[in-house]
Structures are given as C-alpha cells and as structure tokens.
Amino acid sequence: MANTHRPFDLLEDFNRAYGNLFRAPGLRGDRDTYATGDWLPTADIKEESGHYLIAMDVPGIDADDIDVTVHDGVLSIRGHRETESKKAENTMVRIERSSGHFVRQFQLPNAVDCDSVDATIRNGVLTIRLPKAKESQPKRIKVR
C-alpha cells in the first residue's frame, strides 16, 4: 500500500476544529439547519416548481430505522445505523463506515404544505418531497 503525504490535512483539521469552537452545539453552517449524533448523513435540498426535494444519503439503513417528522415548521430526520461489528461473527480488522444515531433538522419555508410531505428510501437515498402550499390570496373583507 502506498503511503501518501498530504501536508494540508493538518491545516484542514485545525480549521474545522477552530470553526467548531464558536458554533453552538448541533449547528452546522446554516442558521436553519441543526444536526447532531454519532454521524451525520449528507443532504441536498432542491427547489422545483411545485415542491422542495431533500435527498439524504443513508446507505445501509432500513425505512423502519428512520423517523421523519414535521412540527412547528421544522422537518426532523432521526435515524440509526447499527455497527457492522455487532452484526458480524468475525472480528473486524478495520471500520471506516460511520454508525450510530443521527438527527438532522431543517427549518421549512412558510410555503410548505406540511400535511402532504412524503418520504421514500431507495438505493440508500432518503428522498423527502415537500409540496409547496398554495399561495394565499388577499381576501377582501366587507366592512359593515
């Protein structure tokens, strides 16, 4: 196996640690995102004409091990991936894949129809479809 010299890895580790010193626990970059747990699956959020789509990488997790809720304008995704070493009869030589619990939360725009949110998992990707609510139109009130 080749030994690769990566001189900037230490600098990247320092920048990551220094940046996390001043960040509130669980916050990851955006003010409208909260994340905590033993590992954090990555997510992409896309806006389309009639809905928002969240695609989250959750390889090795069954639908029964993921909980998706919407409450007070916050989408919460909680899950658990079992450690492979607990499943295997053989001794693990190396473990690189993350396992354990995770929580990701996203502040939803006001224009989401929370009653119609749909979540599916396929090929290790959790897809959450958040339909946009119909825009409210001004209503003229007759004064009597």
Image: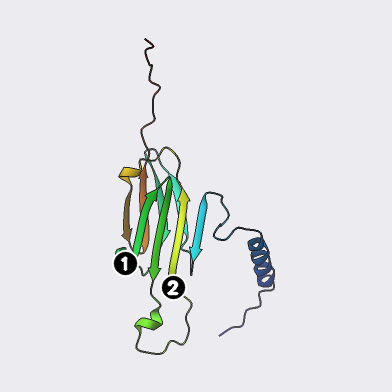
Callout 1 amino acid: Asp
**Residue 120 coordinates in the image, percent (x, y):** 31, 56
Residue drawn at x 42%, y 45% as measured from the top left = 72
Q: Is residue 56 above or below residue 90?
A: above
Note whether residue 58 is visible: no
Q: Give the colour scheme shown.
A: rainbow
What residue did someone put label 2 on?
Answer: 99
Q: Quadrant of the C terminus?
A: top left
Structural distance between the alpha carbons of marks 2 and 1: 13 Å
Along the line of sight, the residue nearer the viewer: 116 or 42: 116
**Residue 142 coordinates in the image, percent (x, y):** 37, 12
Q: Quadrant of the N terminus?
A: bottom right
What is the residue that sits farthest to the front in this orientation? 144
Q: Is residue 135 above or below residue 50?
A: above
Callout 2 amino acid: Ser
Q: Is residue 115 above or below residue 122?
A: above
What residue did someone put label 1 on?
Answer: 62
- Please tell me in which quadrant of the rendered image residue 134 appears: top left
Along the line of sight, the residue nearer the viewer: 45 or 72: 72
**Residue 77 coordinates in the image, percent (x, y):** 40, 57
Along the line of sight, the residue nearer the viewer: 91 or 26: 26
Residue drawn at x 47%, y 80% as measured from the top left = 95
What is the residue that sits farthest to the top in this orientation? 144
Helix, strand or loop at mark 1: loop
Circles 2 and 1 in contact, beta carbons < 8 Å:
no
Along the line of sight, the residue nearer the viewer: 111 or 121: 111
Could you tell which of marks 2 and 1 lies nearer the N-terminus? 1
Q: Residues within 10 Å of mark 2 (few under 14, many from 20)?
A: some
**Residue 109 coordinates in the image, percent (x, y):** 45, 41
Q: Residues within 10 Å of mark 1 (few under 14, many from 20)?
A: some
